[in-house]
Image: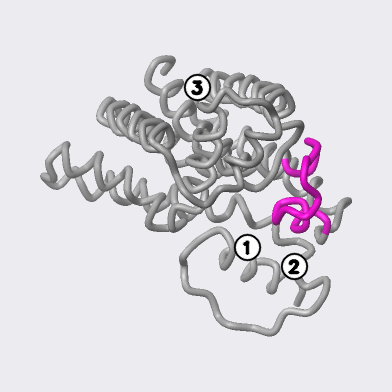
């Protein structure tokens, strides 16, 4: 029953997909991070189906703009909120304490809007370059990959605020089972997409390793650690970079 409740909790937290209302007790969500990548699977399936539907004559403009909107609709912009906050803080070029204050500020500034607009235009532009079913399949799979690495980062990277939602969520997880499941999910992703195209899978994994190291270095340098907002920033950056790699290094 704890696995079922963990599944429901994960989708309730990280998506806007309606879930049955259940009573949660302490420990019921200790496997919820195992199902975080499943939200990416749902997004990926919808993306793949959408691109398949658009072969029937939908314009390219409608195809790429709606494909860009699908993750936002499924997640409710959950990760974009963190991307905006972190972009504002990083763009301030202030000291660490001031960056943390800006990060916690619920308002968004001009640099956050500019950053999101830039990321959205880059993402939509590269979407228009997808040509084959194989490329679309890799694109769809990258949403789960981003969440696998985000989950691993949540466990292995230091937090600068133990009262933050991310730190509290990690604290309630089974610290032996959940990381092991995430590693198994990563292995399954590599095996499945490696059979589809080994070279492209290797390129995406190289990008993943680089982004993980960059994320660790950047967040420790700028904030002294990670929190929920930085995790959202990380997911968005991964999704953009994975698409870029897919188009530039097919």
Rendered residue at 46%/21% (across/down): 245
Rendered residue at 57%/21% (across/down): 207
Tag on residue 29?
2
Asked if 77 appears above or below 239 in the picture, the reply is below
Tag on residue 10?
1
**In the rendered image, which residue does mark 3 sit on?**
200
Magenta-drawn stretch contains 140: no
Query: Residue lying farthest right?
Result: 176
| Residue 127 location, quadrant | top left
Whole-percent x, y for residue 182 in the image: 72, 45
**Left or right of 12: which side holds 174?**
right
Asked whether disc 2 touches disc 3, contact meaning CB atoms under 8 Å apart, the reply is no
Rendered residue at 64%/68% (across/down): 9
Which span of residues is magenta-colored? 154-171
The answer, for residue 138, to whether it is visible in the render is yes
**Left or right of 148: which side holds 59?**
left
Whole-percent x, y for residue 239 in the image: 48, 35
């Amino acid at each position: 029953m704890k696995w079922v409740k963990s599944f429901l909790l994960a989708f309730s937290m990280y998506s806007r997909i309606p879930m049955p209302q259940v009573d949660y007790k302490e420990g019921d969500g200790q496997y919820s991070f195992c199902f975080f990548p499943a939200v990416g699977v749902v997004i990926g399936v919808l993306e793949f189906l959408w691109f398949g539907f658009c072969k029937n004559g939908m314009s390219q403009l409608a195809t790429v703009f709606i494909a860009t909107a699908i993750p936002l609709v499924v997640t409710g912009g959950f990760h974009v909120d963190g991307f905006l906050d972190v972009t504002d803080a990083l763009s301030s070029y202030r000291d660490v304490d001031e960056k943390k204050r800006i990060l916690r500020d619920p308002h968004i500034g001009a640099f956050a809007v500019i950053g999101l607009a830039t990321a959205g235009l880059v993402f939509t532009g590269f979407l228009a370059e997808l040509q084959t079913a194989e490329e679309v399949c890799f694109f769809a799979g990258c949403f789960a990959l981003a969440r696998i690495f985000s989950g691993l980062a949540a466990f292995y990277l230091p937090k600068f605020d133990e009262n933050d939602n991310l730190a509290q969520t990690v604290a309630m997880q089974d610290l032996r089972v959940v990381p092991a499941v995430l590693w198994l999910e990563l292995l399954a992703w590599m095996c499945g997409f490696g059979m589809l195209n080994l070279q492209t899978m290797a390129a995406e994994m190289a990008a993943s390793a680089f982004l993980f190291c960059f994320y660790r270095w950047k967040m420790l340098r700028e904030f002294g650690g990670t929190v929920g907002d930085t995790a959202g920033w990380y997911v968005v950056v991964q999704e953009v970079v994975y698409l870029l790699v897919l188009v530039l290094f097919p």
